[in-house]
Image (tube, rainbow, N blue to C red):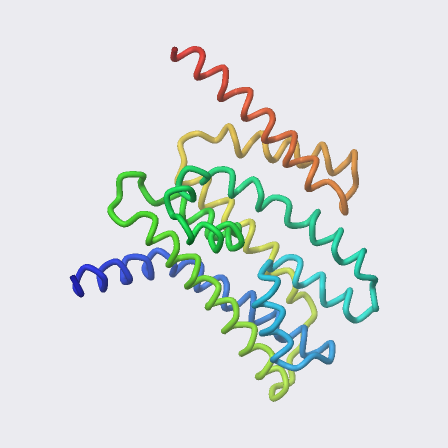
Amino acid sequence: MKNNKKKMLYDAWIKSLPILFSYVFVSFSYGLMMQNAGYAWYYSLFTSLTVYTGAFQFVLITFLSSGASIVTIAVTALLMNSRQTFYSLTFLDDFKQMRHRKWYMIQTMTDETYAVNCTIPQNEKNRHKQMFLIAFFSRCYWMIGAVLGGILGQILPVQLEGIDFCMTALFVIIFIDQWESSTNHKPALIGVVMGVICLFIFGARTFMLPALIFTSGILLLIQGKENQADA
């Protein structure tokens, strides 16, 4: 029994390694930027513990420094993180089977954990336990990196110019990895095209949610037609 648990922990940890190598560096830069804005490491830890959304946490630094209103912060958080709702919809059946753990999973479905969970076969033993452990490990990685960035930022003189681009680079890497691991590139192409179209129509600040809605709608229509054809 103990050997099985150790193997399950080990397998989940191995699957989470890509997230480790990306999260630690990205959250480290976040901790550095928080410290540079005048917030000690424990602010980075508290924010990562309660917010846990990398892209918005970087934006939150600007909001905190500029004294933005609660309404502005709340609306921006909703729009920027709306994509995570679509991620959770993909795993509704899995979450139902995870019982009380589903409440944690719903709140921790990020770009990276979604990408890794998609690689776990449906018939793999302890699939749901691995998904939970990957989500837990990933959150720990992010908090550790944020704290290290905040602490070392107080000690070491660091030039922060361009460091916020690391989040964009991370998303590009995830996209490339999904492209290479999948034989069906139709969803990716539809997502890119709709993203560009919505960018021109709605602007850089508000294009994300419309792009997700249109992309999901198109993919649902395609899936429905394919299911009808198979039937």
Residue at 60% from the left image edge and 65% from the top image edge: 50
* Image-based side of 65 in relation to 102, left or right: right
Q: Nearer the viewer, residue 181 or 225?
A: 225
Placement of the N terminus among the 4 image quadrants:
bottom left
Placement of the C terminus among the 4 image quadrants:
top left
Residue at 43% from the left image edge and 64% from the top image edge: 20
Q: Residue furthest bottom?
A: 155
Vertical relation: 43 (above or below) 113: below
Q: How many marks?
A: 0
* Image-based side of 199 in relation to 149, left or right: right
Residue at 40% from the left image edge and 47% from the top image edge: 117
Residue 193 lies, in percent from the top left, at: 64, 31
Residue 72 lies, in percent from the top left, at: 80, 56
Residue at 83% from the left image edge and 68% from the top image edge: 66
The quarter of the picture where residue 5 lies is bottom left
Q: Nearer the viewer, residue 49 or 40?
A: 49
Q: Residue furthest front?
A: 100
Residue 189 lies, in percent from the top left, at: 56, 31
Vertical relation: 124 (above or below) 183: below
Vertical relation: 152 (above or below) 183: below
* Image-based side of 10 in relation to 73, left or right: left
Residue 139 lies, in percent from the top left, at: 48, 64
